[in-house]
Image (spheres, grey):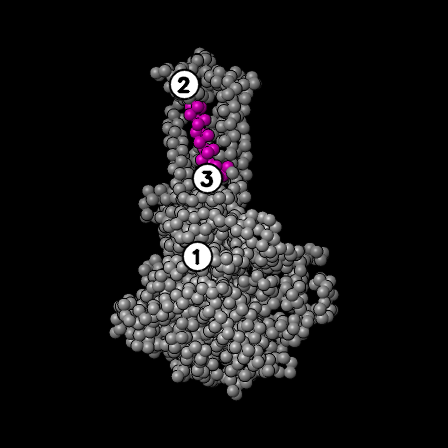
């Protein structure tokens, strides 16, 4: 039995999904924590500094590569699994088991994930490319702001501008809802996949996952809303 | 319990053999007693078909007491019909009312090809067991049954997994046609017992490999299998299998 | 003609001596010897696994879609073994004695003693295979009591002991399949024995999916095809359980022993209507805690709960104070029939008695309250706690009862009635389990050897596994040691061709009747004749009528049967037709045997032969023999007698009072 077999078997592929999923959940915690700085009431100073730290320090930059790898694996593997699993039933049912046997979002991880992927492309275009690649080629450059004599990218201002559009705000909210349901299944499922089989732990993780799936996407959704309604 | 009779419309999948294309066919049965089992209702229908010179509907059944795991109908969108923790043979017509239309399909999965009408080939399950679902002990080698005490809760949990009747409802219910509940029940059953210890790692690796070879999908923890399992095998066995697999995969040479 | 080949010497030493002196086959020769096994229940699967492990080339056949589905799986209560783990005085001798006595002194001493001897090994073997038997908190195996014994020697796995044992044997079998020692043929039905020079040399099997006939060679053939209870149409057997394999062997010269010995199980769910296709057993273990009663007043239509304690007749406790509700099955069944025939039956059909758990629930509730230190628990609390205990013990059985009847047995007493459950009769075998055809063996319920006229609860599993794991591996060597010189015969041999032709002729004949009546309707009619006239109670007049009626039914069957579909395809109606045709012939023989046996013993109760208080009256002077019937053409049999010699046990009137 080789390691390759371990990770390419049906269980192994799920392991990849589970581990990358947990990694992405960790990323969400960092991301939401950082972005919550917009509500510091200092017109974005703390937020811009934090964003600068993430962009200008070595360790987060290295982790960022891992993050992209994580996303990439999670997405590719997810699509491959969805396609393979679908192919395992060449003739479908006339009447489906549906919600009697499982939650709709548990069965719709592919669709939810796809919505999140579409959002991600938009999101990267909105914020990541200008802050990392601004000025290169045609990529538009972020405005600058100065705190204590040092110049920072004014990402806060960028958010304000982006979230002026109601369409964008609605798209972000839709994405957050997708993320919420993706997490409602994904959080506890990831832990089952990596082998947590104690009934009590599973119950705790499900409760924790549900809490996470509500709080984190809600916090994310409140960001565009806050900008749009002028709360920050 | 109030007894009553009913007339029903049945929409049943008919398929001559594995290589032919199947289709639904409509039938009507009358004066069905609420006391009958679902399969007895099919017996009535088949007698009617034979009388009318049509071919009766082929379906798998044997013990008719919910333990052999042979019966396998997908009734109104649920394996084994509407009752919880139940097999088709134990489903009784009390579950339906006059005028109902009931749709009956075979188990659907690439790994369970249709043989005829509602019968499917589940030999893939046998081959998964062949890959390692046993303890290698030859007849006559055993020590005294009480030589190795096993904690009651472990024995009970092992038994809860061993209750699996191998009917395949988990595969039929799963959107991925995954056999993980079946597989994990066997892995759990044996992994929880000290007798299963020596082959613990190779068992789970080989059985998963065979399951993949048979063309079952992978598990996405939707829980549909657990919801439909006639013996209420728990989803936690799948998580245990995952743990066993990781452990075996990481430590196996 | 019948030589039982019982080894000489004292009973205790026979099996050891036999094992020490029987011929052996060396490993290199085992690889060249092929064995065919028909049926994969406890006997078949355990034999296939053991023989495969030993190095023989084994081919195993079952008509089910997987060997794991054989009807052994449905056994609920448990498996006996003389382990004496409970320190209650059990021993090999006691198990042997209980089995002989339970069988009403119609079983062969040597075989039964061997069964008791190997019983302990079975438990060890199964535990080693990972069978999750019930355990005590200390981690040791748990036991319960069963009918017909006064010790606790029954090992169990909730109400699914048969399932767990079969899965154990099935896994051992699949392991041999994986190793290439056993080749498994599922969805195959054996339809003929092939004999060459008087020896069994193979079978003709039908692939039930394709409908084609196949020839298979074997140096020996083992029939592990179960019992024939389905001759009654309604029984606790699986729908597919049939006599065909045994019957083909019988027609090829294997004599059939004690066909009339049928076990009627006392605790089954009563028939609910004409649509009924099978009967469901409620494990005998329920009689440990349930009390059986009927109203004292004839035709009482009150609800059970409205009948006060003093107006209930706990007739088993009244008639048999020593064993009470735990009398053997035949006694309990007859007592229930007697009450219902007298007009005391309950339920809408009046063909049922109550099995009541109220007392047990309260008793367990009080124990539980004590354990939890609740001295002042109310009756409701006690009952609630008692229900929990009962649920843990019998939960799955109670659920099954509720699914079938729609009544909640925790609240109202169960209604039960006897139903056909097991057949003690079967192919006659000698000490080595060989039939009268050399090279043809019968194991498990398919043979007649161990249970006499009545089988004790939890002994069928024991016998199936004893035969498969611990007996046949020795005895078959004794035969095959002389077969090492016979090369495998090509299946082109004329005997194979002739056998295949006879099978295909019969199939074509069945298909070409093109009459009007379905197989099912014939089977139902046969069942009714058998149940009415050769069931729980029989008399000479009824049996004679039954024989005439069955002969007429046979004629009608072969002239007005309608089998739809084609030969060369999956055709369940054709499979059934083949089986019912054999059941009809067997039914006639059963009546003949019952008519011949002018005594009552065990499951065979002739109304003419009973004591004043209605107990079975044996006639040891004239009938202490195995009635073995040799097939001599259509509706024609010759009786051979194997006289039973009791060297150790003195037969007495069975007394459970």
Where is residue C324? Give x, y as percent: 63, 72
The disc numbered 1 marks a residue on which chain?
B
Residues at discs 1 and 2 both on one chain: no
Find residue A153 and report its horizontal and vertical position in percent. Answer: 43, 16
Q: Write down the chain letter for disc 2.
A: A
Q: Is residue A198 visible?
A: no
Q: For marks 1 and 3, give the one nearer the viewer.
A: 3
> Mark 1 to mark 3: distance in Å?
29 Å
User: Would you name the residue on which mark 2 appears?
Assistant: A130
Q: Secondary structure at mark 2?
A: helix
Image coordinates for residue A24, horizontal then vertical, percent: 44, 32
Which residue bears the numbered disc 1?
B194
Q: Residue furthest bottom?
A: C621
The answer as to whether the residues below labels 1 and 3 share one chain is no
Whole-angstrom CA distance, mark 1 to mark 2, is 60 Å
The chief SS type of the magenta part is helix
Q: In which quadrant will I find the C terminus of chain A?
A: top right
Give the extent of the magenta segment.
A105-124
- Write the residue at 55% across / 72% down: C529
Residue at (48% x, 18% y) in the render: A162
Using the image as rendered, state which of residue B26 and residue C165 is in the foreground.
B26
Residue C56: x percent and y percent?
A: 32, 67
Does the magenta segment cover residue A110?
yes
C143 within the magenta span: no
């Amino acid at each position: 039995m080789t390691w390759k077999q371990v990770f390419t078997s049906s269980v192994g592929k799920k392991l990849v999904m589970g581990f990358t999923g947990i990694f992405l959940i960790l990323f969400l915690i960092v991301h939401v924590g950082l972005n919550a700085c917009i509500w510091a009431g200092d017109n974005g100073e703390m937020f811009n500094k934090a964003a600068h730290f993430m962009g200008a320090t070595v360790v987060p930059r290295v982790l960022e590569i891992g993050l992209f790898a994580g996303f990439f694996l999670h997405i590719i593997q997810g699509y491959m699994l969805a396609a393979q699993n679908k192919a395992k039933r060449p003739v479908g049912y006339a009447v489906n088991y549906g919600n009697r046997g499982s939650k709709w979002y548990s069965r719709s991880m592919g669709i939810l994930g796809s919505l999140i992927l579409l959002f991600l492309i938009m999101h990267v275009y909105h914020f990541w490319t200008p802050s990392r690649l601004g000025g290169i080629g045609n990529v538009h450059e972020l405005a600058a702001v100065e705190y204590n004599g040092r110049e920072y990218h004014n990402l806060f201002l960028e958010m304000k501008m982006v979230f002026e559009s109601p369409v964008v705000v609605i798209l972000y909210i839709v994405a957050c809802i997708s993320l919420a349901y993706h997490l409602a299944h994904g959080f506890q499922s990831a832990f089952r996949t990596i082998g947590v089989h104690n009934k009590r732990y599973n119950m705790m993780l499900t409760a924790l996952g549900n809490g996470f799936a509500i709080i984190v996407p809600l916090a994310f959704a409140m960001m565009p809303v806050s900008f749009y309604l002028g709360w920050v | 319990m109030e007894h009553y009779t009913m007339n029903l419309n049945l929409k049943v999948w008919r398929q001559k053999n594995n290589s032919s294309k199947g289709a639904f066919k409509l039938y009507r049965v009358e004066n069905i007693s609420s006391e009958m089992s679902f399969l007895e209702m099919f017996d009535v229908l088949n007698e009617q078909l034979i009388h009318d010179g049509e071919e009766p509907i082929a379906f798998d059944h044997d013990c008719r007491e919910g333990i052999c795991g042979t019966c396998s109908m997908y009734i109104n969108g649920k394996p084994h019909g509407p009752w919880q923790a139940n097999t088709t043979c134990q489903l009784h017509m009390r579950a339906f009312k006059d005028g109902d239309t009931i749709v009956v399909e075979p188990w659907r999965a690439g790994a369970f090809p249709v043989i005829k009408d509602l019968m499917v080939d589940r030999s893939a399950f046998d081959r998964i067991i062949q890959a390692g679902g046993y303890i290698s002990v030859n007849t006559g080698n055993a020590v005294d049954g009480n030589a190795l005490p096993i904690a009651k809760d472990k024995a009970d949990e092992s038994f809860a997994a061993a209750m699996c009747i191998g009917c395949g409802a988990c595969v039929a219910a799963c959107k991925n046609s995954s056999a993980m509940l079946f597989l994990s029940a066997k892995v759990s059953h044996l992994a929880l017992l000290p007798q299963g210890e020596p082959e613990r790692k190779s068992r789970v690796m080989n059985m998963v490999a065979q399951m993949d070879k048979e063309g079952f999908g992978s598990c996405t923890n939707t829980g549909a299998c657990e919801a439909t399992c006639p013996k209420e095998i728990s989803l936690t066995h799948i998580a245990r299998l995952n743990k066993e697999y990781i452990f075996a995969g990481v430590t196996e040479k | 003609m019948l030589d039982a080949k019982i080894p000489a010497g004292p009973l205790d030493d026979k099996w050891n001596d036999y094992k020490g002196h029987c011929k052996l086959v060396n490993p290199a020769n085992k690889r060249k010897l092929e064995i065919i096994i028909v049926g994969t229940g406890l006997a078949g699967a355990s034999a296939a696994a053991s023989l495969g492990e030993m190095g023989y080339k084994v081919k195993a056949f079952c008509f089910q879609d997987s060997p794991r589905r054989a009807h052994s799986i449905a056994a609920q209560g448990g498996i006996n073994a003389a382990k004496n783990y409970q320190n209650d005085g059990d021993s090999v001798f006691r198990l042997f004695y209980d089995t002989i006595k339970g069988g009403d002194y119609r079983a062969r001493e040597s075989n039964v003693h061997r069964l008791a001897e190997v019983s302990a090994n079975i438990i060890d073997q199964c535990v080693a295979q990972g069978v999750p038997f019930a355990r005590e908190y200390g981690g040791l195996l748990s036991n319960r009591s069963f009918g017909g014994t006064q010790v606790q020697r029954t090992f169990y796995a909730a109400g699914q002991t048969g399932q767990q044992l079969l899965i154990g044997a099935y896994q051992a079998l699949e392991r041999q399949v994986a190793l290439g020692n056993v080749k498994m043929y599922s969805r195959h039905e054996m339809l003929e024995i092939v004999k060459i020079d008087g020896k069994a040399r193979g079978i003709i099997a039908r692939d039930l999916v394709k409908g084609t006939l196949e020839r298979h060679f074997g140096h020996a053939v083992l029939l592990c095809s179960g019992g024939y209870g389905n001759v009654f149409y309604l029984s606790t057997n699986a729908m597919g359980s049939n006599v065909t394999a045994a019957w083909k062997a019988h027609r090829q010269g294997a004599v059939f022993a004690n066909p009339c010995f049928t076990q009627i199980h006392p605790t089954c769910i009563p028939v609910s209507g004409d649509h009924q296709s099978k009967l469901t057993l409620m494990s005998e273990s329920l009689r440990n805690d349930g009390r059986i009663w009927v109203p004292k007043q004839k035709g009482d239509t009150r609800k059970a709960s409205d009948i006060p304690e003093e107006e209930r007749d706990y007739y088993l406790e009244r008639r048999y104070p020593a064993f009470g509700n735990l009398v053997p099955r035949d006694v309990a069944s007859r007592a229930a029939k007697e009450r219902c025939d007298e007009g005391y039956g309950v339920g809408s059909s009046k063909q049922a008695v109550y099995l009541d758990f109220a007392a047990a629930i309260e008793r367990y509730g009080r124990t539980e309250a004590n354990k939890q230190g609740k001295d002042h628990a109310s009756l409701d609390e006690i009952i609630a706690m008692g229900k929990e205990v009962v649920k843990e013990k019998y939960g799955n059985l109670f659920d099954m009862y509720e699914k079938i009847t729609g009544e909640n047995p925790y609240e109202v007493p169960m209604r039960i009635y006897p139903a056909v459950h097991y057949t003690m009769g079967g192919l006659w075998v000698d000490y080595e389990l060989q039939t009268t055809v050399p090279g043809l063996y019968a194991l498990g319920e398919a043979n007649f050897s161990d249970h006499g006229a009545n089988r004790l609860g939890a002994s069928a599993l024991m016998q199936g596994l004893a035969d498969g794991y611990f007996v046949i591996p020795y005895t078959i060597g004794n035969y095959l040691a002389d077969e090492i010189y016979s090369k495998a015969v090509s299946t082109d041999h004329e005997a194979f061709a002739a056998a295949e032709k006879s099978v295909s002729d019969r199939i074509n004949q069945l298909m070409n009747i093109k009459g009007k009546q379905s197989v099912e309707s014939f089977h139902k009619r046969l069942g009714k004749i058998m149940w009415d006239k050769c069931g729980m109670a029989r008399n000479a007049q009824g049996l004679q009528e039954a024989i005439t009626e069955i002969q007429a039914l046979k004629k009608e069957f072969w002239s007005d049967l309608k089998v739809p579909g084609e030969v060369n395809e999956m055709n369940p109606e054709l499979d059934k037709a083949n089986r019912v045709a054999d059941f009809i012939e067997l039914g006639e023989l059963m009546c003949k045997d019952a008519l011949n046996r002018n005594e009552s013993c065990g499951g065979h109760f002739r109304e003419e032969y009973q004591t004043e208080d209605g107990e079975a009256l044996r006639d040891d002077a004239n009938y202490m023999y195995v009635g073995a019937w040799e097939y001599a053409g259509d509706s024609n049999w010759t009786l051979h007698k194997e006289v039973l010699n009791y060297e150790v046990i003195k037969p007495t009137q069975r007394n459970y009072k």
